[in-house]
Amino acid sequence: MKFHPVYLLLLVPFVALLWVPFYDRAEPSLMGIPFFYWYQMAWTLLGAACTWPVYRHEERARQKEAGK
Amino acid sequence: MSAHPIAIAIFLVLFVLVSCLGFVATRWRKADLHSVHEWGLGGRSFGTIITWFLLGGDLYTAYTFIAVPAAIFGTGAIGFFAVPFTILIYPILFLCFPRLWAVAHRHGYVTAADFVKGRFGSRTLSLAIALTGIAAIIPYVALQLVGMQVVFAGLGIPSTFAGIPNLPVIIAFAVLAAYTYSSGLRGTALTAVVKDLLIYATVLTAIVVIPAQLGGYGKVFGSIAPKMLVLPHGSDTSLGATFTYASLALGSALALFLYPHSLTGILSSSSSSAIRKNAILLPTYSLALALLALLGFMAIAAGIKAMPEYASGFGAFGNNFAIPALFLHMFPSWFVGLAFAAIAIGALVPASIMAIASGNLFTRNIYKAFIAPDCSPRQEARAAKLASLAVKLFALVFVLVFPTKAAIQLQLLGGVWICQTLPSVLLALYTRWFHPVGLLAGWAAGTVSGSVMAWQLGLASNVYPLHLFGLTIPCYAAVLALLLNLAVTVVVTLVMNAVSPNRTDETVPADYLA
């Protein structure tokens, strides 16, 4: 698979979750859950959302390959 | 502790039903189970959905579901690192493992060590990878049995029956061993489906009912000491707990798919596309894990530690008893039976895959590579089955003979060890520049240094405070060991490539695409 900028999306969760001081705080809380927790919980789904476009890209590339 | 008859009855019914399913599985997608590919990889036939259940049941073990909330219960925010850890595994799964699946499919590799042998033509390096895998996985199996012991204690099942100590866990072990032996990965996959449905039912109920009974999430978190809820920031002299948190998440994420049981789950899928899809679908388990982790705080808010009826459980299992105690405190007996069955069956699934994976490693990379090179496929499968039995037996004896602490400590070491196979397996998917002697030297340097660090910490922690230029860097030992491993690998490779370059490689670039 050749490089395509869409692959950079796979790095986003690493930046979002490994830069801990950014989210290491209690406020703003959501429904009583401190920021530290709901932020990371949100990334379980956001992480998958980052992978989705990469998946689509690879599927398209594969179809093109097969169509040749 | 008093027995809970209704809970025990529900528990037993579910446990027996699922065990039967494990045996029936021999007939599912019927094939000749006298081959390693069929017994040990389910014929590489599992589609997206079965792979989802299988990997979900495999990666999120019963012990995880007990230990992660327990860590939160005991130490607060730092225990939550399991959540970023289980998020970061998926970009790695998506990017790297379809390549491994493809090359394994092309060449019939069953284990990571098979791939390493094909890629570098080195039996010694392959043996090192196989031994690391087996050594890392035995304490992991042992912890699953510990998870079962916790549940049995929670149900009030006496640990000694008819004068035989530890009879319940021995029976559970026998069930596990028998169905793994007879149906292999098929049995595990079917039980995984039931286990996951039970786990999801339990989690969803728990996260709605328990906070409601405790007066809502706001009240739960309000009753926790604010210091426990966040990590202390670093200072001028130390990078602090926030760095530790990141290093634990990253190091664990890098290591997870190098574990033999993860790889077995991946290689059993029918296409690389099933793996890619699962990299998007599996994070639902991480969300479930995060919600379960919060139960640790709810256990604090409910004040279960001070309740005399749970004192003996905490005495025997420490904080690992927090979640069983919370469930006993909050739920009616029948639901406790269901939840505990979910946990116990949740222990069977990964324990079974782990045993199968180590059986595969033994038969492929030790038995066939060194002992009986000309063995028939039938003998090969037999050796795998017997080895998986031996691994389980070893884990059982370990749990019965040594204190629980020993299994936890060894599992901690196992995480450090398995991380050291990263250059030989993961990086080798992209380049064969590395020289096998370099990889072996790096592996040895990483394994020894990692073990020494863990030893210096009294095996009580895996966070090593590295002192560098007046700065303290509290880092996950596996990451530090891996850095040393990489440095040694590169230096020795440079030397070896100049002296005697290695040209053995049975794979070609096209093998990695699928």
Image (cartoon, coloured by chain):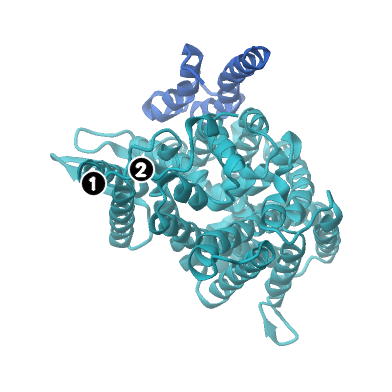
Chain colours: A blue, B cyan
Q: Secondary structure at mark 1?
A: helix
Apparent side of residue A35 relative to residue A53 in the rendered image (left or right): left
| Residue B426, visible in the rendered structure | yes
Apparent side of residue B26 relative to residue B79 in the rendered image (left or right): right
Q: Secondary structure at mark 2?
A: loop
Q: Amino acid at mark 1?
A: Met
Position of the C terminus of chain B, as image quadrant, is top right
Residue at 67%, 63% in the rendered image? B381
Residue at 29%, 48% in the rendered image? B438
The image quarter in which residue B341 lies: bottom right
Q: Provide residue B155's location: percent of width, then percent of height.
A: 73, 64
Position of the N terminus of chain B, as image quadrant, is bottom right
Provide the chain ID for the residue under circle 2: B
Q: Relative to B469, is B41 above or below?
A: below
Residue at 64%, 59% in the rendered image? B356
Gap between marks 1 and 2 measured at Cα: 12 Å
Apparent side of residue B106 relative to residue B18 in the rendered image (left or right): left
Residue topped by disc 2: B503
The image quarter in which residue A62 lies: top right
* Residue furthest to the bottom: B163
| Marking on residue B496 | 1
Q: Amino acid at mark 2?
A: Arg
Q: Provide residue B51's location: percent of width, then percent of height.
A: 70, 40
Residue at 60%, 54% in the rendered image? B63
| Residue B314, visible in the rendered structure | no
- Report crowding for label 1: few under 14, some 14 to 19, many 20 or more residues within 10 A (C-alpha): some
Q: Relative to B143, is B66 above or below?
A: above
